Image: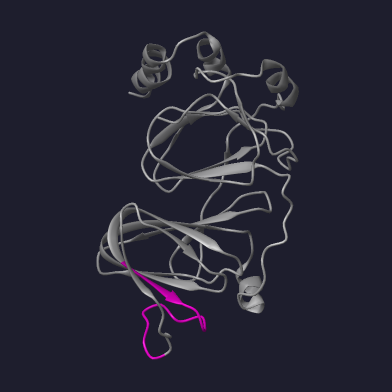
Amino acid sequence: ERSRYLLHHLVLEPSRNCLGTVWERSRYLLNYLVLEPGEALFLNANEPHAYLFGDCIECMAESDNVVRAGLTPKFKDVDVLCEMLTYDDGPPYMVPPLLIDGGAERYIAPVPEFLVDRAMVEAGGAVLLPASPFVSIVVVVEGRGKLEELVRQQPQLGGGANSVDGLVHAVRQGSVFMACAGTALQVRAEERLLIFRATAKHDLAEAEAAGGGGAPSLPTTTAASASASASPAPLASPIGGDRAASNRQHVSFGPKP
C-alpha cells in the first residue's frame, strides 16, 4: 500500500503537473514524509522543501526573501541558491506536541521566534489557551463555536464566577483573529472545532510574570517554519546539521497546491 502511495504522489502525479527536470532529480534526494493530523515538522532556514498536497498550518519567522529552486515559472536565482543551501542531510526534525494547562497542545520549535498551539475541541467541550505575553494570531481550521477573550486574570477551564467578562466572538472555519498580549482565550465548540494559535516563544511562568506587558524583543535574522497538520499532508525536505540558522532566506520548490 505504501509503495503504491509513494509511486503515485512522489513520482507520477508531480510528473504530470510539473515541467522541467529539477523535481525529477531532486525528489530522490529529499525525505518523503506524510504528516498525520496533529503531527508537526520543523524546517530550518536554507533547506529546500516542497509541499505536494493536503492542508497544513505553517508558522514562519520573519523573512525577506524566497529563493525558488524549481517547479515554478518565476525567477530562479541559481547562484544564490547554490551559495545559501546548507547541504546537510538527515532524518526529518519532528516536533512532538506538549499538553499544556487548559487542554491544548503546544509545538515548541528549536528557534526563539515562535511557538504554535493546537486545540481540537469536541462539540459541547471547551479548551483554554493560556495568555501569552505577546500578540497572538488565531486561525480556525474546522468547525464552529465561541471564542471568549479573558483579559484580567487566568481563569479556570469551565468558567464560573472567576471568569471575567470579555469580548465573545462567534467563530467558524476560516475565521482569523489577533489576540492582544496578556489575553487568555476560552474556546467552546458547538461542533467539532480545530483551532491554531501562533505567538512568540515563551513559557507559562514567563507569561504569568509578564502580565501581558511589553512587545517581544527577538532576533530578526533567524528563519524557520513549522507545520502542524490539519489533515494528512505529504511533503519532502532534508533536515540535519546545525538547526540554529541565522539566515532569513526561504527556499521553495514552488507554489503550494
The answer to whether residue 245 is magenta is no
* Residue depicted at x 63% and y 66%: 203
Residue 165 in the image, given as x and y percentages of width and height:
40, 84
47 lies above or below 187: above
* Residue depicted at x 43% and y 67%: 103
Residue 47 in the image, given as x and y percentages of width and height:
64, 30
183 lies above or below 4: below
* Residue depicted at x 66% and y 76%: 210
Please say which color scheme the image uses: one colour
Image quadrant holding the N terminus, namely top left
Q: Residue lying at the far bottom in this picture: please name it.
A: 161
Q: Nearer the viewer, residue 95 or 228?
A: 228
Q: Quadrant of residue 191?
A: bottom left
The answer to whether residue 149 is magenta is yes
Q: Quadrant of residue 57?
A: top left
Region of the chain picked out in magenta, as a range: 146-161
Q: Nearer the viewer, residue 135 or 194?
A: 135
Image quadrant holding the C terminus, namely top left
In the rendered view, does 248 fall on the left or right side of 169? right
Give the total number of marks visible in the rendering: 0
Q: Quadrant of residue 148?
A: bottom left
Q: Please, what is the dominant secondary structure of the magenta stretch? A: loop
* Residue depicted at x 38% and y 21%: 9
In the rendered view, does 106 fall on the left or right side of 177? right
In the rendered view, does 148 fall on the left or right side of 224? left
184 lies above or below 107: below
Residue 144 in the image, given as x and y percentages of width and height:
27, 60
Residue 223 in the image, given as x and y percentages of width and height:
66, 42
186 lies above or below 226: below
